[in-house]
Amino acid sequence: MSSTASTITALAASLRDGGSSPRELLAKTLAHIDATNTRTHAYLRTTRELAERQADAAARTLRANPESAPSMCGIPVALKDVLCVDGVETTASSRVLGGFTPPYTGTAVQRLFDAGAVCVGKTNCDEFAMGSSNENSAFGPVGNPWDVERVPGGSSGGSAASVAAGDVPCALGSDTGGSIRQPASLCGVVGFKPTYGRVSRYGLIAFASSLDQIGPFARSVEDAAIVYATIAGHDPRDSTSDPRAVDDPLLRLRDGVAGMRLGVPKEYFGMGIDPSVREAVEAALRVLEGLGATLHHVSLPSTEVGLSTYYIIAPAECSSNLARYDGVRFGLRVEHPALIDMYLRTRDQGFGPEVKRRVMLGTYALSSGYYDAYYRKAQKVRTLIADEFTRVFADVDALVSPTSPTAAFPMGDRDDPISMYMCDVVTLPVNLAGLPGISVPCGFAGGLPVGLQVIAPRFEDSRVFRVAHAYEQATEWHRARSPLAEAAA
Amino acid sequence: MLARLGLDEGERERFGAQLEAILDHISKLQQVDTSDVSEMAQVGELVNVMRDDVREPCLGAERALSNAPAGDGRHFVVGAIQENELDG
């Protein structure tokens, strides 16, 4: 059985009944990556040795007790290269971290490993997860499996492309302003950003700590829910990790949307949306209506200033987090006898242009003369944005919208920073408010995938899965396979 | 200088123009009325999360230094800090 055609649930069943073994599945997966990676460049490195050890351990678990083996036992996964794995080079796609080998494994990744998952490699991404096209990677861009001349979205472009290319059934990414949902949309796969505080950030290379969350890519909503259920939950090593018990997203996954009130935020259908994307999403809304949900027009008036708010808060936090890359404790050092010049040279040669722009923007917004006008002001508008969501959720159960205003665009198409920032205009408000959100395939625009975004109140992650699952099961979009996946199968 | 980036002349010019355009774009924030709004630093409800003050295992010096560009087995090694260099 090829992993190309399969979901976690199908692969797990085959592993349990002995139809295939973790080693066989691993060998097929690595061969598949060999065939696709020359076109996508989704992987910065594969981790064969680690994967073989994990596959053998999974085989022992399956042999000992196939029925009680955890759901991820023997399942191949790919990890965005911002996630630390003990002994595996982790670079965040930056020259400044070239050769960095973490001495520990992050919590979300460890939970996947404890559940028997097999890590096949580290995926390419925008440098330090800053970008919407994966073109900011210091190690080269990623090709979209639907058209390798186009971007896969970003920043988790490699993880999205790998799932879309049929390499792995699931992968982890991180989402600070849309970095899971937007590439999922552009690559035609499912991508989920959990409620802020649900998944531990311990072992995630920090970009903007009040916005970052780790989440899954998968080929079905159920698979995304399985991975989420595996990685979610309180972790004392992350002080923003929430101690509340996580409700099982699979329990009510199949309860449907009949009687649900779904809000359609009118601002999310403006903002430079491509007419064919709008058409696909409006058709999806009619499907949800056909399933018994009622649609309600709602307004989130601060959406227009969300982008400005985000592009102060995220760079401010990034400038502080990236101060640690100073050539002293890890990564690149460009030698100079004077310490200050060593810092300046290391950071100038270590960081790419987008990271430099954001570090400068952030230090500027936090500097004493401009703090009130920029950073403090943005923090206040952030309150307004979060309050608007709260008000809207008093009247509706969930929100539905496009994930991205456009489908995948050609590489090199957006060379000015502001037009690139517009990619995340309907995903980043979700991070500012700490809400759970998903992108699920909902059709095509000019032959390229389009995603439907579902957003719910904080800690209602299960509701997001339930709405997305109902939609997915009523349509065939999630079965569509990219040309690259077809060719490699 | 705050950013600790040693930019060359070309970078200064290019980034200068780009940052000006970005700042111009985000200045629309100033039009939002926030007179009765408090700041939000984080979305969570958790405040001052502490752990018990007990010793736990941690990385030893050898592992902590394993990625250092320069170390002496016990410490990170850096160049001299010279006051007059700080103006650069």
Image: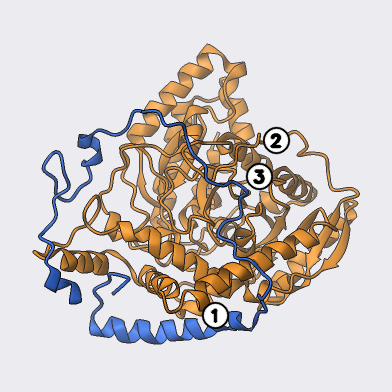
Same subunit: marks 3 and 2: yes
Res A203 quadrant in image: top left
> What is the display colour for chain A?
orange
How far apart are the alpha carbons under marks 1 and 3?
Answer: 37 Å
Which amino acid lies under the numbered mark 3 shown in the image of this protein? Ser
Nearer the observer, A244 or A406: A244
SS under mark 1: helix
What residue did someone put label 2 on?
Answer: A247
How far apart are the alpha carbons under marks 3 and 2?
Answer: 19 Å
Q: Which residue is drawn at 60% across and 18% down?
A: A68
**Labelled pair 1, 2 in contact (Cβ < 8 Å):** no
Q: Which chain does the numbered disc 3 sit on?
A: A
Which amino acid lies under the numbered mark 2 shown in the image of this protein? Asp
What residue did someone put label 3 on?
Answer: A220
Q: Which chain does the numbered disc 1 sit on?
A: B
Q: Say whether disc 3 or disc 2 marks the residue closer to the N-terminus.
A: 3
> What is the display colour for chain B?
blue
Foreground tag (1 vs 3): 1
